Image: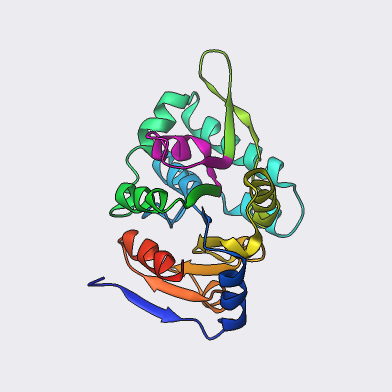
Amino acid sequence: MEGTDFIFSGSVNRGKILEMEMTGKIRLVVWDMDGVLTEHPSSWKYLHERIGVDNSVNRNSWISGKISYREFIQKDIQLWLDKAGRFTKQEAMEMLGQIRLRSNIIPAIEELRKHNIKSVIVSGGVSWLADLINNEKMFEMVYANEILTDHAGNIIPDGKPNVLPDRKDLIISEVQELLGIQKEQSVSVGDSPFDISMFRQTGIRIAYNPLDKSIADAADFVITSNDLYSVVERILALS
């Protein structure tokens, strides 16, 4: 499409594409959410910015292995509560609802559905944003991380880490088993180094507006565009 840069990655395995063709057409696309379906690179970071907190200490502690991912979530949410005093699900969703989505997201996913290709979100982002994106039930399944609340809808300093950012392959494997779809019939679309874990479990790997060289190098295709339909066109050309 006009305004779209598309390249084969130097790491593309043409034999793998032939293997995919032998096992059947593409049947599943697994999408990262933050930075792929949205323009902002992180729903967590977006909330940090809106509330006015810095989570770099918590992030460094998680990256270095000093705390678990759930502890990372807990400490980040505690930052919000320390700053705001009280913070509700409704307030968070109103903020998340202001995140800009990629152009043509609805027609892009609907076009895949017309070709009997299922779409699934697997994201380390906030599940409330994933729910907003999937309001029209375009996606077959949605996996993202939950923020917990009390009975009144007030956010508490705890969460449910359904998706470990560096082990998205585990979720994708479960999805493939549930849907009866082979690895070689699956495509993953990501933008960050964490999404390399997605790439391990799909036959075709697309880096969409990659954040750094590592994710681009791990991909079969690199696409730079704000229009999600450009990714769908590439997928349909392979199927």
Was residue 130 drawn as part of the magenta stretch in this picture? yes
Is there any visible trace of residue 54 in the rendered image?
no
Is there any visible trace of residue 64 in the rendered image?
yes
In this view, the residue farthest toward the right is: 66
Q: Vertically, is 217 above or below 153?
A: below
| Residue displayed at 37% across by 77% down | 6
Position of residue 4 in the picture relative to residue 206 (left or right)? left
* Position in image of residue 198 (x %, y %): 61, 60
* Position in image of residue 184 (x %, y %): 62, 65
| Residue displayed at 35% across by 47% down | 110
State the residue in front, 173 or 225: 173
| Residue displayed at 39% across by 41% down | 50
Figure disc tally: 0
State the residue in front, 11 or 175: 175
| Residue displayed at 65% across by 51% down | 176
Which residues, given as a range, are shown in magenta?
Answer: 123-144
State the residue in front, 214 or 62: 214
Position of residue 70 in the picture relative to residue 8 (left or right)? right
* Position in image of residue 41 (x %, y %): 44, 56
Give the quadrant of residue 71.
Answer: top right
* Position in image of residue 81 (x %, y %): 54, 30
Q: Vertically, is 84 above or below 119?
A: above
Q: Vertically, is 182 above or below 212?
A: above
State the residue in front, 38 or 117: 117
Was residue 104 drawn as part of the magenta stretch in this picture? no
